[in-house]
Image (cartoon, rainbow, N blue to C red):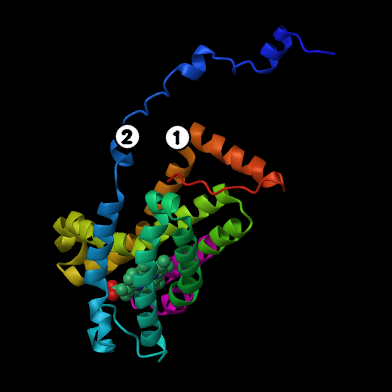
Amino acid sequence: MTRTTSDSRHLTAAPPTDTASRRPPPKPSPARWWERPWILPLALFSVTFLLFAVPPYLSLDPADSRLPVPESPSWYFPVLVIHVFGGALITLLVILQVWPWLRTRHPAVHRWSGRVYVLAGLPLVGVPAMLIAPFSEAGASAQISGFVWAALWSAFTVLGYVKARRRRFADHREWMLRSFALVYGIAFNRVLHVLLVMITAPRVDTVYGGDFEAMSLDLGAASGFLSWILPLLFVEWWIKYRKPRRRSRRARTTDKRTASPASPAEPDHSA
Ligand code: HEM
């Protein structure tokens, strides 16, 4: 049977041109202040902190340590030094990990530096912190706070790694954000301690009998706890409330793809 003109016209017809497809894509809404480039301030803050925190340990001499070094156990100082150098490494790596541009443009760099962050961070930072925390000269409160902080950082980091290996990228992002928050506990502690001392200074005579050292040590326990709990709470808020609709849609897409063996899930590159 020969095809009629109308048949062939039907077969070669141009795709439908509905008005929606011709409409220009909607303009992205202007970034809010916290969505503007924050990686540079974060990097500057981190480098400034490292320049302040690390040099006393470069001499490998316990006399230069900022932290009082207990006489026993003898391994305390070497383990502290390993922790400080490992901490400097993961502070630099974590900036790369949370940098959205690098994650989108160079996912292989994100993957490799992420592996180093986990596989070097656990033996060089998390485990040493758990070992030295119980010997802190700052007292029982600081010992407990330090140990819980180290255990949580290690657990969050392992969970983040496991989720990435299982291609559960929405979960990976959340656990790694928690791990990131706890890395900054140490730098935040310095700022917070100074703030607490300034706030409490007017009461140094009435509460501490004029003993500034005693006041500073006392506040060390409070700033020790707050310095990792506050960043963690902030990140929980960030995960739960920031752009919840966009996030949950992406998470749903990722989960659906994960469920289908034919189409592996892709990482979510949003911050
Ligand atoms: C990742 C999570 C971290 C945990 C759980 C952790 C935990 C600890 C603990 C428990 C101590 C001993 C505190 C005491 O005895 O009172 C300590 C000391 C120290 N940590 Fe970390 N830390 C972490 C990350 C870092 C990072 C990223 C750095 C960066 C260099 C760092 C640098 C130091 C330094 C320099 C000290 C000695 C204290 C001082 O000199 O002021 N830590 N840390």
Q: Is residue 169 magenta?
A: no
Which of the pair 78/198 is nearer the observer?
Answer: 78
> Residue drawn at (30%, 63%), measured in percent from left and top?
187
Dot 2: element: loop
Q: Assess whether residue 148 is covered by the magenta stretch.
A: yes
Q: Magenta residues, as a range?
A: 127-156
Mark 1 vs mark 2: in front: 2
The answer to which image quadrant residue 56 occupies is bottom left
User: Visible in this render: residue 225?
Assistant: no
Residue 105 lies left or right of residue 221; in this view the side is right
Q: Quadrant of ligand 1?
A: bottom left
Question: Residue 31 or 91: which is nearer the viewer?
Answer: 31
Q: Is mark 2 within 8 Å of ligand 1?
A: no
Q: Residue flagged by tag 1: what amino acid is it?
A: Lys
Image location of residue 103, percent across then percent down = 44, 52
Q: Which amino acid does label 2 sit on?
A: Ala
Residue 35 in the image: above or below residue 131: above
Residue at image coords 29%, 45%: 37
Task: Name the residue rendered at 61%, 53% in the picture.
Answer: 167
Q: Which residue lies furthest to the right in this view?
A: 1
Query: What number is the disc on residue 31?
Result: 2
Q: Main secondary structure of the magenta part?
A: helix
User: Where is 18 relative to 27, above or below?
Assistant: above
Q: Is mark 1 on a helix, strand or loop?
A: loop
Percent across and percent down for residue 241 are: 45, 37
For residue 18, say whether it is visible: yes
At label 1, counting other C-alpha atoms closer than 10 Å, the crowd grade (few under 14, some 14-19, many 20 or more) is few
Which residue is the site of mark 1?
243
User: Could you tell me which quadrant the N terminus lies in?
Assistant: top right
Query: Foreground residue, 120 or 6?
Result: 6
